[in-house]
Amino acid sequence: MNKATFQACTDVALIKYWGKKNEQLRLPENGSISITLADLHTITTVEFSSSYNQDEIIIDNEQLDIEVNRVIEHLNRIRQLANTALRAKVVSQNNFPKSTGLSSSGSGFAALTLAACTALNLNLSDKEMSILARQASGTACRCVIGGFVEWLDGNTSDTSYSTAIFSNQHWDIRDVVAVVDSNIKDISSTAGHTTAQTSNFYQTRLQHINRKINQIKKFIKSKDFTQFGELIEQECLEFHAILLTSKPSLIAWQPGTIAVMKTVQALRKSGIPAYFTINTGFNVHVLTLPAYQLAVTQALQKLPCVQNVLTSQISAKPQKLSTHLF
Ligand code: DP6
C-alpha cells in the first residue's frame, strides 16, 4: 500500500538559523541548535495512487492553505527521487496554532517528508532524510532528527544536514509556551530570511555565531541551566535586534509578547529559573526545569494577554503511526 502516516514534533531553536547563503537549496548562513518538542506535533498521512488525478492537500481541515504550493513542490522532489508520477492525497493535523512563530512548517514538512518517502518505499538514511526535508523548510531538517539537534553549517547540499548531539533522555528541560495570539503572523520566516543581510548588525552576528554554538553545546553537556538560559535569552534578543533593524523592519512582537518577557525576568528575580526565546512570531517559549514547570505555567496563565499555555518535554525521533488520518 502506498500510504503512510508520521508524527513529527516541532522544535525551538536555541541558537537560531537566520539568513540563507543559497535560497533555492535552503543553505543557511550559519549552523543552529534546537530542541524538539514532544507535545507540539504534526501528524500527516500521505497516499500515492493512480486513482488521484491531482495532488490534494488538506491542512488542519482546510484545502486552501497558504502552504499548498510548497507542499506540491516538495512532493515533486520526492516523486523525482522515487521515479514516479503518481499523485498524492495529503492530510495533515497540527495540535498547536500554525504560522504563529511555533515552527509549524518544521514539524509539518518533517512529517510530510517521512510519510511520503515511506509511502513510496524510499529507504533513506537520517542524513538523507534531513537533507531532503531541508529543501522544503530549514527547520524541518532538524525536526526529522529529534532530541537536542545541531544543523551543521555546510556549504553544499550534501553537507548541510542535522544530527542529534544528545538524545531527549540526556537532560529534562521543559518548554512552557505562552500563546498570546493564534492568528497567522504578518511575515513568514521564509520572507524574513531574505532581509537578514540588510541589518547593519548581521555580519557581527555571523562573526560570533560559532562561538555561541560551541558554548551552548558545552552548557547542554554539563547541564548548566543558568549559563544555558542566559545564552539562549541573549541570543533571542540579538536575533530580534537583527529583525528590528532589517529593511523593512520586522517587528514580530505584540504587547503580550513583551509582557511575557518581563514576567519571565521577574520570575527569575524571585528565584525561579526560567528563560525566554522567541522566533519570528509573537508567541513565547519559556524554558525551565521540571520542578518549576508548574510555577511558570501558573504565572503565565495569570497574565491577561496570555490566551493559552502549552507545556512540553523534549521529544525523541518522529514516529511512524499505524492509524491513518483518512
Ligand atoms: C527564526 O525554517 O521557518 O525560527 O527555511 O524558509 O522554511 P524556511 O524558514 P524557517 O526559519 C526558521 C527561523 C527561526 C530560527 C530557527 O528556527 O532556527
Image (cartoon, rainbow, N blue to C red):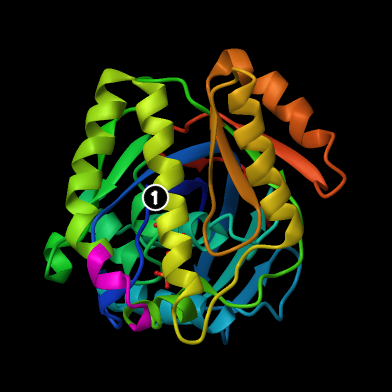
User: Foreground: 259 or 123?
Assistant: 259
**Lateral position of residue 35 relative to residue 220, left or right:** right
Q: Which residue sits at x=83%, y=40%? A: 303
Mark 1 sits near ligand 1, with its Cβ under 8 Å away? no
**Lateral position of residue 192 relative to residue 204, left or right:** right
Task: Name the quadrant containing residue 62.
Answer: bottom right
Residue tagged 1: 235
Give the extent of the magenta segment. Answer: 198-204
Few, some or many C-alpha atoms within 10 Å of disc 1 (few <14, some 14-19, many ≥20)? Answer: many
**Quadrant of the image containing the C terminus:** bottom right
User: Foreground: 163 or 58?
Assistant: 163
Dot 1 amino acid type: Glu
Q: Which residue sits at x=35%, y=28%? A: 227
Check the image and report above or below for 3 versus 287. Answer: below
Expressed as whole percent of the image width and height from the top left, the position of residue 274 reads 56, 29
Check the image and report above or below for 291 versus 114. Answer: above
